[in-house]
Image (tube, rainbow, N blue to C red):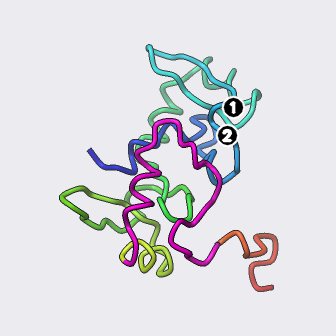
Amino acid sequence: MDIVNRCQGFLCPTCGYSLLRMHIDPKVAPKAIHDENVYTFCCEECVKPFLDAPEPYLAEIKEIIICPICLCEKRKRHTICIVHKEESIFLCRCPNCIAEFKRCPEPYIERMKDKEFKDYEMKFPCGASCPGEVNYLNPFK
């Protein structure tokens, strides 16, 4: 199994956003059960539409992964796969994320394996440049 795909529980199934990147603690985020699986949401407003018709939402997020470095969400076909110790790791295509993973993979792999994601904030264990320093309203600043 792909390590990054294990964190699909950290995607809001309704809007497809990474709870981790939005700094939403999965332990306190809204949850709902469907087919004996627990799903975590970014907000209460996303729960009802999901429960009303879960299958289209689940199909939509099936191929979304979370980059273990910057915690952004990407469709798997828009990622780069790096094989590390016989496991496929999918990263966004950002050269900084790729370089950081190659330089220091273990902390990122460990945090993606953490089912509770205790380290849910956007932390860079090996000192990568933080994408959070970018002004997303005006990325050229």
Residue 78 in the figure: left or right of residue 29? left
- Magenta part, dominant SS: loop
Residue 105 is a magenta residue: yes
* Residue sitting at x 44%, y 14%: 36
* Relative depth, front residue between 129 and 89: 129
Where on the picture, by quarter, is residue 53? top right
Dot 2 alpha-carbon crowd within 10 angstroms: few under 14, some 14 to 19, many 20 or more: some
Residue at the spot x=50%, y=58% of the render? 74
Q: Residue at x 63, y 23 (%)?
A: 31
Q: Is residue 56 above or below residue 21?
A: above
Residue range highlighted in magenta? 103-130
Name the quadrant containing residue 21.
Answer: bottom right
Q: Residue at x 56, y 58 (%)?
A: 71
| Element under disc 1 | loop
- Distance CA(mark 2)–CA(mark 1): 6 Å
Q: Callout 1, which amino acid?
A: Ala
The quadrant in which the N terminus is found is top left
